[in-house]
């Protein structure tokens, strides 16, 4: 067929006559008229418009995909750090929010679970990690002796039926003199840091 995208009416009519003459046995008596030429031109225009629309849609789709790939790192994708542990509140004792009595140090791995004043005494509850209960008891006794505090200040209670590879092994409860707030760090006003939970807070493991 003639070029339908840039039609020359004269050439198109000659080509139509030739094509129809070649198919005379199939379409007997076919006549090329100006209407036939006009219809052919209109058909070619429709093909051109449709091809243009399809091309524009394809280009637009490709552009959207490329833009999405380029901007996706800035749309909520976390920066890989290799660490998938959620951020934890800082340790209240290390911050000095409510410091331990002078000379008392804790030289075993622990997490503060709760802290508060009960009947004129500070009750500090810890969970300890990895060590056997006897080792924790020995370290606590040495620390209490160094600080001039009685050994009964601390109780050590291992969790029952712990597997051999358990990380958290048990609970330490320290009954100490009442401590005053000892740091102006803003995080010391957060109960999630100090573990001094208000009475209206529902007990939860979400506090750290």
Image: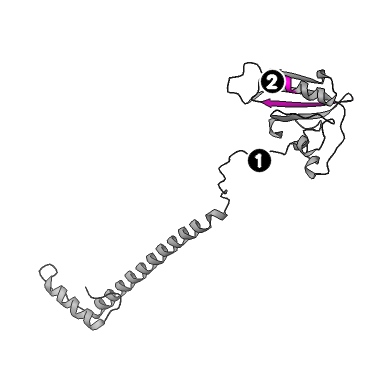
52 or 47: which is nearer to us?
A: 52
Name the spot of residue 63 as percent of width and height, x first.
45, 62
Earlier-in-chain disc, 1 versus 2: 1
Q: Which residue is mark 1?
A: 87
Q: Quadrant of residue 179?
A: top right
Tell me, yes or no, if residue 165 can be seen here. yes
Q: Residue furthest bottom?
A: 10
Q: Residue 125 lies in magenta, yes or no?
A: yes
Name the spot of residue 194 as percent of width and height, x first.
78, 35
Look at the image and give the residue range highlighted in magenta: 119-139
Dot label at residue 109: none
Q: Residue furthest top?
A: 161
Q: Quadrant of residue 4?
A: bottom left
68 or 125: which is nearer to us?
A: 125
186 versus 192 height, above or below: below
Q: Residue at x 73, y 27 (%)?
A: 126
Name the spot of residue 21 as percent of width and height, x first.
12, 74
Q: Residue at x 19, y 76 (%)?
A: 16
Name the secondary structure under disc 2: helix
Q: Which residue is mark 2?
A: 135
193 or 164: which is nearer to us?
A: 164
Report the Cα–Cα distance between label 1 and label 2. Answer: 29 Å
81 versus 100 height, above or below: below
18 versus 176 height, above or below: below
22 or 95: which is nearer to us?
A: 95
Q: Residue 143 lies in magenta, yes or no?
A: no
Q: Is residue 84 left or right of residue 67?
A: right
Circle 1 crowding by C-alpha within 10 Å: few under 14, some 14–19, many from 20: few
Can you say which quadrant of the picture contains the N terminus?
bottom left
144 versus 46 height, above or below: above
Circle 2 crowding by C-alpha within 10 Å: few under 14, some 14–19, many from 20: few
């Amino acid at each position: 067929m003639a070029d339908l995208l840039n039609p020359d009416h004269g050439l198109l009519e000659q080509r139509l006559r030739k094509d129809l003459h070649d198919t005379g046995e199939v379409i007997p008596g076919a006549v090329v008229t100006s209407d036939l030429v006009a219809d052919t031109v209109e058909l070619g225009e429709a093909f051109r418009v449709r091809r243009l629309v399809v091309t524009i849609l394809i280009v637009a789709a490709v552009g959207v995909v490329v833009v999405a790939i380029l901007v996706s790192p800035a749309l909520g994708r976390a920066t890989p750090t290799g660490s998938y542990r959620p951020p934890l509140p800082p340790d209240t004792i290390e911050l000095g929010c409510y410091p331990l009595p002078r000379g008392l140090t804790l030289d075993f791995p622990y997490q503060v679970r709760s802290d508060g004043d009960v009947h004129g005494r500070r009750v500090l509850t810890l969970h300890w990690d990895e060590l056997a209960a006897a080792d924790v008891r020995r370290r606590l006794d040495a620390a209490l002796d160094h600080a001039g505090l009685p050994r009964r200040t601390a109780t050590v209670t291992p969790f029952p039926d712990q597997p051999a590879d358990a990380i958290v092994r048990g609970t330490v409860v320290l009954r100490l003199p009442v401590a005053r707030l000892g740091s102006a760090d803003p995080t010391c006003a957060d109960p999630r840091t100090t573990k001094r939970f208000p009475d209206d807070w529902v007990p939860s493991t979400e506090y750290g």
